[in-house]
Image: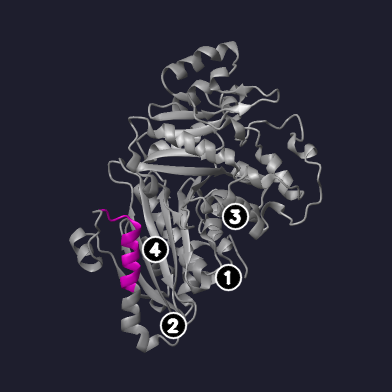
Amino acid sequence: MYYDKNLGTRQKALKVNLDRRIYGSFAEIGAGQEVAAQFFKAGGASGTIAKTISAYDMTFSDAIYGVEESGRYVVESRLTKMLHREYNLLQMRLNEKRGAESTFFAFADTVVALNYQKTNEGHGWIGLRFQLQPGAPYNDVVMHVKMLDTENLLQQQALGVVGVNLIYGCYYYYKSPETLLLSLMDDLSPERLEIDMIRFTGPDFVNVDNRLMSLYLVKNGFTNVALFGPDGNVLQPSEALYKRNIVCIRGRFRPVTHVNLDMLENGVKQFLEDPEVNPEKVVVLSELTLHNLKHGQEIDEKDYMDRVNILASLGQTVMISNYQEYYKLVAYLSKITKLKIGLILGMSNLEYIFEEKHYEFLPGGILEAFATLFSRKVKLYVYPMMQADGKLYSCTDFTLPPNQIDLFEYLLANNKLEAIRDFDENLLHIISDNVLAMIKDGIDGWEIMVPTQVARIIKERNLFGYISKTHYTNVSEIVAPASENESNDPSFSF
């Protein structure tokens, strides 16, 4: 399979049109019929297009596809109904005539583009249901996009391009889902279009792990955030987090230890005590940043999946982000929800946040970053650490340069920071890097530092370099940090 990244949109559409196997229909709601138009303009469309439809009026749309309980039309459930109806119609009306020689497809999108007043954000759901062999079962590729151009016509044009890329990729790059994903942004840029969710299903994609596809979206710059639930199903962040109280813990989780769970349990408990928090609307996120997934300059995909599988076993919803700085994460979450947001972190991360060098590129420096990070609806819950001398170190003991003391006192006085109280001091000696070293070197004793189900999964699946036989017995050379640059903070994640 050859991937030509320079192949233009018109060339792709023409190649599909000239492939007599490929035949199907287009159903597009919102932003015109830009995808179908690309195939019409390329020439030879009669060999590809059985029908196009665009049910703009809500009454017509409901009559054709059914009523949405939510009352919203730019949602995945509407896209699913469109794909189901249009594909079934193809099969019913054309299977006898050309089913033996055609690979049928139904393309659908439901989109809202920039309005005349430019008061909304363009986004939409796009999907393709398709066969790869005549008479074969269908596959689905579904994705959510955000159109970022500042003109309506440009957003429509971008939608047309990504739609052609999807159809072309599904038929010509299906053997390599990662290549298919990469090709979706051909003739586009992240400044024009964001893909924040993609899902592959069907018999030809049984070996595709959509959580790995989510990582590729972030890794390749198609989006800054991807999200999936403990069941492994990918989620569209704006829908999953809309009008929710969000509490987030960031870490390497390599592996998850008792400290991580103690932080999470007590941090969430204090978050729920806040009168602004509705317990029925709380979403808890375990966040992995690209920075924390890298070994050198590369991401170890197996290691990533090991961590994700363990978090899933603990019932965690996982977020992958490209936001190393906390204020950027808060800026993103604050666009989705106006409700209270809580961040759970350790002392080392608090120290990192107050280092002014991280904000030198901002015109307003640290104050500009803090205006976002400590906005009206955000609060930090800080977990203590045990220092090398055995003394407890919490945010009430936080030492700062003179020019930041008043700023820190202001944040404390205004309830923007809070020490996690009911922590288990007996766990503070557990350092995840040391646990990982013990696992790799076959040293006994690491099992008591992690939850029981985590130890079981590591052993059953040989995760993190686990070996069954003990090669070393001298634990003392492992339990101390390997260098003076390592932190004693068990929650350290940078």
Which residue corresponds to the image point at 58% horizontal and 38% vertical from the top-left? Answer: 259
Find residue 44 and report its horizontal and vertical position in percent.
42, 75
In the image, residue 364 sits, relative to residue 84, either above or below, namely above
Total marks in image: 4
Rendered image: mark on residue 35: 4
Classify mark 3: helix, strand or loop: helix
Question: What amino acid is found at the position of numbered circle 2 in the picture?
Answer: Ser
Query: Callout 2: 10 Å neighbours few (<14), some, many (20+)?
Result: many
Find disc 3 in the rendering and name its residue.
Answer: 305
Q: CA distance from mark 2 to mark 1?
A: 19 Å
Classify mark 2: helix, strand or loop: loop
Find residue 418 and report its horizontal and vertical position in percent.
47, 25
Task: Tell us which disc is closer to us: 2 or 3.
Answer: 3
Q: Please state the extent of the stretch shown in magenta in the rendering.
A: 72-86
Of residues 74 and 6, the one nearer the viewer is 74
Find disc 2 in the rendering and name its residue.
Answer: 102
The tag earlier along the polypeptide, 2 or 3, is 2
Of residues 329 and 259, the one nearer the viewer is 259
Question: What amino acid is found at the position of numbered circle 4 in the picture?
Answer: Val
Whether tag 1 and tag 3 are in contact, CB under 8 A, the answer is no
Whether tag 2 and tag 1 are in contact, CB under 8 A, the answer is no
Find disc 1 in the rendering and name its residue.
Answer: 175
The tag earlier along the polypeptide, 4 or 1, is 4
